[in-house]
Image (tube, grey):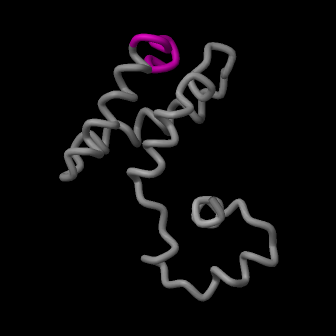
Amino acid sequence: EEDLLSRLGLLVESNKRQSSNLSIEESGIDISTVLQLLVANKSIIFCPSNLDTDLNCCLCMTLISLLHDQRKNVQNMASNIVKHLLVHRKAAFED
């Protein structure tokens, strides 16, 4: 759990100093992890009451570029999230 929180940059300041010695590759968040978090929390993030158009726009642009990723698992997860957006948040997707 601490590893996930540190990768997401959510640990308290004292723990940040420990991770500051990591290289960029070691501290980078794998896109698969981010997509898994989106899939796991899609009902919260993509709920109709979430009117954050900037978030939706950034997600759409990022997901569309991830559809061309060379990793099949990334393509599949991005595709599933785009499908969910089209079904449940078509208006946000069109914006």
Which quarter of the rendered picture does the N terminus lie within? Answer: bottom right
Q: From the viewer's perspective, is residue 23 above or below residue 84?
A: below
- Horizontal and vertical percent for residue 66? 31, 44
> Is 10 left or right of 74, judged from the image as shown?
right
Q: From the viewer's perspective, is residue 44 above or below residue 9?
A: above
Look at the image and give the residue range highlighted in magenta.
87-95
Does the magenta segment cover residue 66? no
| Displayed quadrant of residue 72 | top left
Nearest to the observer: residue 54 or residue 69 = 69
Residue at position x 40%, y 42% from top?
A: 62
Query: What secondary structure is the stretch in magenta mostly built from?
Result: helix
- Horizontal and vertical percent for residue 65? 31, 43
Residue at position x 41%, y 11% from top?
A: 87
- Horizontal and vertical percent for residue 32? 38, 50
- Horizontal and vertical percent for residue 11? 74, 65
Residue at position x 56%, y 32% from top?
A: 41
Residue at position x 48%, y 78% from top?
A: 24
Q: In the orientation shown, which residue stands out farthest toward the bottom?
A: 21
Nearest to the observer: residue 2 or residue 33 = 2
> Is 73 left or right of 32, judged from the image as shown?
left
Q: From the viewer's perspective, is residue 44 above or below residue 77?
A: above
> Is 73 left or right of 39, judged from the image as shown?
left
